[in-house]
Image: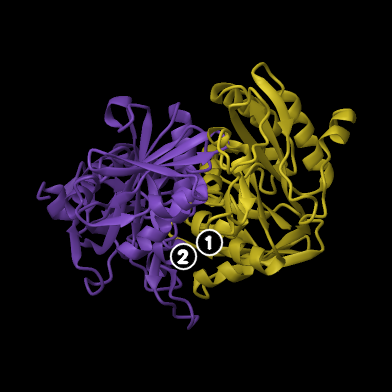
Amino acid sequence: MRAARVLITARSIAWARTAAQSMTGFATSVIGCKVEAGIEAELLPQETPDGRPGVSVLLFGFDVEGLRGRLVDRVGQTVLTCATTACFDGLPEATERVIVGGALRHFGDKFQSSKIVNGNRYWRIPVMEGEFLVQEAFGVQKAIGGGNFLILAADPDAALTAAEAAVDVMRKVRGIILPFPGGMVRAGSKVGAKHYKKMIASTNDAYCPTLRGRTDVTSELPEGVNSVLEIVVDGLDRPAIESALRAGIDAACRPGVIAISAGNYGGKLGKHLFQLHTLLAEPSA
Amino acid sequence: MDSRGIFIEDTFAEGFGMAAARVVITAAHPKWSRAAALKLTGFATSVIACKCEAAIERELSPDETPDARPGISALVFAMNPEGLKRRLIERIGQAVLTFPTTSCFDGLPAATDRVPVGRALAAFGDKFQSSDVVGGQRYWRVPVMEGEFLLQESFGVQREAVGGGNFLILGEDAPSALAAAEAAVEAMDGMPGIILPFPGGVVRSGSKVGSRGYRSMIASTNDAYCPTLRLATDSALTEGVNSVLEIVIDGLDADVISRAMRAGIEAACRPGVRAISAGNYGGNLGPFRFHLRQIMAGAC
């Protein structure tokens, strides 16, 4: 995948968070939403370009052009509109860059102006509140989607408690996001469908506890497993995903959890394989 | 006309007809229904760019929900019932079906116009789904890894919904405008039948139709209300106004919008605010007019 990091700053952390929440809504799967996005971290004033509190958001798309389109759409709808915010590129080292502020500036109807500071162009777009400051270009880098693990538990409460524990620690890892609401997914899918030709994905029946006894389902669930949740991780690079998976699995290993597994397509679809045993044999970062 | 010493301009907000649905999400805990609702309603600020406008309407106590669990209601607005149906399928599929412990119900049971939503999403169950009819309504049970996802087959559509209710807060400076906008949002928060689709309920980037500088733009900054352009354009801002924020309101009907506008404007009339105005297109585009002075006089 390709990823961008958007830094949203505001007068208060609450307003930065509000913009980031709106920006990352309806962004759970790239197939259904054209983009996967989530909040990476909250930033202290000393960590942001303008010395105000901020939030960093990661967005993942299939390709550079798609990601550029989503950045323009989402920054335009949820940051440009949001009181007190400014918007900066969070991948200054990336050599590949896409024009975002340079497209949104047209909203200024030729009343906008720009300044170059340290080699980067920033646009000042007049709005009713005052002005919106947005960087001209955003860095884009190669990234990895689809890191995941499955929590196989004795009952739904145990699965949920373990998933919450995993999400809590994983959200502290920089360079990754958990794109699903609350960081977890209950609707694991298989490619295609057995019974509907047109469906590109359908429920992962082998992991559905309510389907275990059926003759037409080959269940993958060990005895005693009655609820399964998945944590999906997108990351800027392999080490970030590995750190997150390691920390998350470690936190999820709690009473009521019977096993940890992972979802894959037999290794045929993705070039990045995360072997759970290898991952856990290495010391935590 | 003044409200607590603050000038109410003699103008109106212009509203458009929309189709709306109310989605009720319940979960084991209110924090889960809220998390699902936030994802459901994200990136849904303007129907043109996001294909729908959506936000949380209010939190629901267990005695207000179909399955007696804590819940939340979200309103989703689109230009027509067909568009609304698609947005519901997409967004419930991505943000609710995926999320642990949630169930999803129609929140407009009295609406006679209905769109099928559950059936399309139940196909995710790959024919392992089943359905039951309870009280004349069909509910789907879709097997997922956690257990099952329960959702209603059909969702009511309110065809007489209205988008584009709004008012403008003209403040002496940015902090005053923001404090007034925050007070207005707080006063309107949880009012039944309305949502504020923009982040935090507030918009700073009011727009005009089209653009003078760029032919292809369908909307561009409302330069007449930009304080930094006062000297560069034909400004509508009176002396002393240096920051303007807008509150945009969508509602299930015109009455609820009027009520929300009155509550919001009353709360926004605070020190540091010079005037309250509203955005319209001269009355040429939308059939609904919300006259500020009539609303503040109590004529909803």
3D distance between C-alphas at marks 2 and 1 = 9 Å
Instruction: Report whether A54 appears left or right of B243.
Output: right
Disc 1 marks which residue? A76
Depth check: give the residue in front, B73 or B263. Answer: B73
Instruction: Report whether B17 appears left or right of A52.
Output: left
Residue lying at 63% horizontally and 22% vertically, measured from the top left: A224
Q: Is residue A183 above or below residue A266?
A: above
Is any atom of residue B154 visible in this view? yes
Task: Output the chain of dot 1.
Answer: A
Q: Quadrant of residue A228?
A: top right
- Quick one: quadrant of the N terminus of chain A? bottom right
The yellow-coloured chain is labelled: A
Instruction: Report whether A60 appears left or right of A107.
Output: right
| Label annotation for residue A232 | none
Relative image position of residue B11 (x, y in whole percent): 20, 62
Q: Quadrant of residue A73?
A: bottom right
Depth check: give the residue in front, B124 or B52. Answer: B124
Is any atom of residue A35 visible in this view? no
Instruction: Give amino acid for label 1.
Output: Gly
Residue lying at 37% horizontally and 55% vertically, measured from the top left: B241
- Please name the color used to draw chain B: purple
- Quick one: quadrant of the C terminus of chain A? top right
Depth check: give the residue in front, B97 or A43. Answer: B97
Relative image position of residue A64 (x, y in whole percent): 71, 66
Q: Is residue B73 above or below residue A130?
A: above
| Label annotation for residue B49 | 2
Can you name the residue that lies furthest to the bottom here?
Answer: B215
Relative image position of residue A38 (x, y in whole percent): 61, 46
- What secondary structure is marked by label 2? helix
Q: Are marks 2 and 1 in contact (CB under 8 Å)?
A: yes
